[in-house]
Image: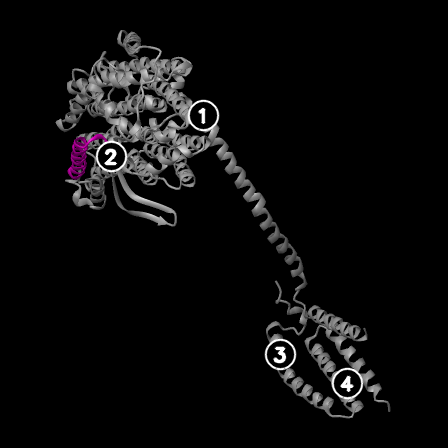
Amino acid sequence: MNPVNYLYLAALLFTIGAAGVLIRRNAIVLFMCVELMLNASNLALVTFSRLHGNLDGQIMAFFTMVVAAAEVVVGLAIIVSIFRTRHSASVDDSNLMKL
Amino acid sequence: MNSLIPLLIAAPLAGAALLLLGGRRLDRSGHWIGVLAAAVSFAFGLVLFFQMLGRPVSQRAVDVKLFSWISVGGFQANAAFQLDQLSIVFVLLITGVGSLIHVYSVGYMAHDERRRRFFGYLNLFLAAMLLLVLADNYLLLYVGWEGVGLASYLLIGFWQHKVSAATAAKKAFIVNRVGDVGLSIAIMLMFTQFGSFTFSQVFAAAPQESRGGLTAIGLLLLLAACGKSAQVPLQSWLGDAMEGPTPVSALIHAATMVTAGVYLITRSNAIFDLAPDARLAVVCVGAVTLLYGAIVGCAKDDIKKALAGSTMSQIGYMVLAAGLGPIGYVFAIMHLVTHGFFKAGLFLGAGSVMHGMNDEVNMRYYGGLRKHLPITFATFGLGYLAIIGFPGLSGYFSKDRIIEAAFAEGGTEGWILGLTALVGAAVTAFYMTRIMLMTFFGERRWQPDGKGELPHPHEAPRVMTLPMIVLAVGSVLAGGLFTINDAFVNWLTPVTGHSEGNSPLSSGTVTLITIVCMVAGIGVSYLVYGRSAVPVNPPVGSALTRAARRDLLQDDINHALLVRPGSALTAALVYFDVKGLDGVVNGVSATIGGLSSRVRRVQNGYVRSYALSMFGGTLVLVATTLLMRSV
């Protein structure tokens, strides 16, 4: 099977994730979309690794997964905390950071 | 014994320092320290005078270099003194009259709680004035010139709790500054033209200088003299200066400081002799001022202001004489000295009258005082006879010679100046008789004071009358003594030079006409103020009288010509500053502020819009990178 197809899939997943981040309001969904974008880029990295015949891309992907795991911990904690105080998970309600 | 010359200045300077820095523990004895300092200085002056008298004529002038003051490259200024026949006359006048007025002030200021400071200022004035007349170069003279200006300012505003006194002091200072600028520019010109400002070097180099340069220096010196001597057009401060205590008016604004301008012109005779155009300006100023002051003196009801007008007029005579050149220098100084005696005496008399009349200065509220103040009446009367030029008294000798000298100028100019001086003499007799009649004769027009009590005029204490008597004796005798064997003329000729000129009228004729003018002035004055009662409220009077009461509109003219354009200029500059400079700065900041408050709307707080902009930015970056790579 042609490995380039994986790249198309990765682009599709990334686009879905980006569109979700821009369009959706629920913080959890937003978060999942971000993860989707990260995994899309992981897929692309692994595919490049395969195409070039070395392990650089795979090592990058491991890094991404570790960072994403850490990010999930912090991000979910923030979301829970916001939900507790505001009783809402909508990111549009958290709009105080403006003049 | 030349070391006495610096001590002459040091004595009053030390007195001033002691009194002004000594603090309250000198409050009770301070005035006698002031008197002592003045008297010591006078004693030194007498010693120096007799020493000078003992030397042959060619060796009378002496120079003393105290120390090198400023030395920068070619610029050498020494603190050096020159005592010659002209300086010693001034030294004796300043310290002599000064000592008398110090003694008088002991009585006059007896009840003033700031008396110690008053004497400190008086001593400071003496020191500065002596420095002025003893300096051997223009720069040191300038120091004294500014010093007397400062002392004058401090003393006019001595009763600074009165707004009028504070304002008058400021006015005198500012008007004097205008003249001072003339002197400072003249000194700079001398330095650029002659490379020096010592009298001897400047006068030696003057003949090689172009006529234009000399005229410029002469006119600038005249400007300086106008400021200090209250000559038209810088005359406006003298009348207001009468706000100061009366001894100050007598010493500074009658006898000594205001004559500094005459000294300056006479001292610079080498320059003025070579600059006939500048001399013409000097005589014009003198002639205009002698009439101006006389007219103002006729209309004033305030006894001190009437005397101030008279001072202005008499200094006009001196300036006129000084402007005549070698014909007149000697007589200018002679009139200056006799005027120092009789005008100081008149002012002290006025002070004595005010002392007896609860500080009332309006002559319309006087009248019939000759019985109550006999000594004042006698001394004032002698001063009066001296100033109007009554034959045999000092004013007769000095003023008569000035009128003769004016005629001796020759040609049309001589006639104009001579006739002006004659008219001035008549007007002098008129206003002085008016003062005399309104104050000492007629019925009492005394007004009750604030508590509803009529004044109880009483003769001043002896400490005040004694100086008045001495000055009265001086005003009687000085002129006659000076004229014996032409003593005064011969004394000053080595410094100023002297020539007789060629008068179209004989000396006897001029004297006769002068006496006729004087008698006419007295007669008219008697008709107006002697025969009929003087109204307590001033009559409306003619347009000239009304103008003269307001000092011939000097303040209005100054206001229209100088103050209003000056205010308009500052207003225009402020407008330019606010609208122009501030406008540009404020405009730039307002534009940036407005722009940024619009740009601020982008920060709307919605996460998705931030995400979108990040996304867009990334896209742009990627697109640009790809584009660059393909190119």
If the image is split into quadrants, where does the C terminus of chain B sit?
A: bottom right
Chain identity of mark 1: B
Figure check: A76 above or below B592: below
Determine crowd level at label 4: few under 14, some 14-19, many 20+ residues with C-alpha closer than 10 A.
Answer: many
Structural distance between the alpha carbons of marks 2 and 4: 113 Å
To which residue does mark 1 refer?
A: B557
Q: Which amino acid, mark 4?
A: Ala
User: What's the magenta region?
Assistant: B32-61
Q: Are marks 3 and 1 on the same chain?
A: no
To which residue does mark 2 refer?
A: B61
Depth check: give the residue in front, B308 or B621: B308
Q: Are marks 1 and 4 in contact (CB under 8 Å)?
A: no
Q: Would residue B374 appear left or right of B418 to someone viewing this image?
A: left
Chain identity of mark 2: B
Q: Would residue B578 appear left or right of B538 to someone viewing this image?
A: right
Q: Secondary structure at mark 1?
A: helix
Marked residue nearer the N-terminal end (4 or 3) = 4
Q: Secondary structure at mark 2?
A: loop
Depth check: give the residue in front, B493 or B598: B493
